[in-house]
Image (cartoon, grey):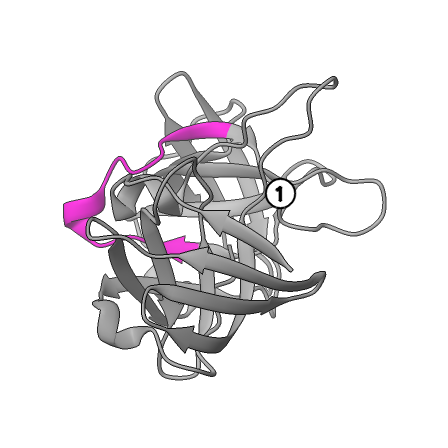
Amino acid sequence: MKTIVLSTAAVAAALALPIVGTAAAAPTMHVRGTIAVVAGNRVTVTTAKGPVVVMLGPKTRFAGVIPGTVDDIKDGTFIGTANVPGHGAARALEVVVFPPAMKGTGEGDYPWDLPAGGNSMSAMTNGTVMKPKMSAMTNATVTKIANGPIKTVSLSYKGGTKMVAIPPGAPVVKVVPGSKALIVVGAHVFVAPGPTAAGAVIVGEMGAVPPM
């Protein structure tokens, strides 16, 4: 069983933390799974690769995500989306809608570790929904919403823009405040790794599973 400790970064940073790594050094991976055991500040998470122990600390931050829809993605909305290359526009694997107070969280376009399938590597793009601009980006502002079964948005972020297509069925969630009371057996969680104690844990509520 592997033990993971997390840094004391704010929830906002944990929701859109770039992967750190090079070809010579494997990137640090996020923890995704279901809580199996809670023993004080020691939490065992069942992941696709086996159990992982996460240690919580006094400065650990907590947040929840609840179900959302593509209708929550409007002009001026700040979102984060894990995505992979597509034809013309990148294809969204998921979308996280941030509340206004968290606008700017993890803004940019950078590598991500959400499994994409095939040979594609996922990227994270955080930005604001705004008027269309042609350029590349991953985490930014949604610039344009197109009609049709696949909603295409133009994201604008500091240093660039990116077109992202949101296919039917792509999970959409909204970030809400949370507390340690969310840490219970059976809860679905997303955790950003770090070198010391837990910094942030994102927990699914109302049937939502953190998709990032």
Q: Is residue 44 above or below residue 37?
A: above
Position of 104 compared to 186: left or right?
Answer: left
| Residue at 38%, 42% in the rendered image | 142
Residue labelled with disc 1: 113
| Amino acid at pointer 1 | Asp
| Residue at 48%, 32% in the rendered image | 18
Q: Count the marks: how many?
A: 1
Name which quarter of the figure residue 143 lies in.
top left
Specify the farthest residue to the left.
101
Name which quarter of the figure residue 47 lies in.
bottom right
Residue 38 horizontal/vertical position (percent): 40, 75
- In the rendered image, residue 13 lying in the magenta stretch gets the answer no
Q: Is residue 207 above or below residue 20?
A: below
Position of 35 compared to 140: left or right?
Answer: right
**Magenta stretch bounds:** 96-109
Q: Is residue 129 visible?
A: no
Quadrant where the N terminus is found in the figure: bottom right
Q: Is residue 168 visible?
A: yes
Q: Nearer the viewer, residue 60 or 100?
A: 60
Q: Is residue 63 above or below residue 116?
A: below
Residue 36 horizontal/vertical position (percent): 52, 78
Q: Nearer the viewer, residue 42 or 167?
A: 42
| Residue at 61%, 24% in the rendered image | 21
Local packing at callout 1 (Cα closer than 10 Å; few below 14, some 14-19, many 20+) is some
Residue 183 horizontal/vertical position (percent): 34, 73
Mark 1 residue element: loop
Q: Is residue 13 above or below residue 108?
A: below
Q: Nearer the viewer, residue 207 or 76?
A: 207
Position of 121 compared to 139: left or right?
Answer: right
Residue 187 horizontal/vertical position (percent): 43, 78
| Residue at 35%, 21% in the rendered image | 158
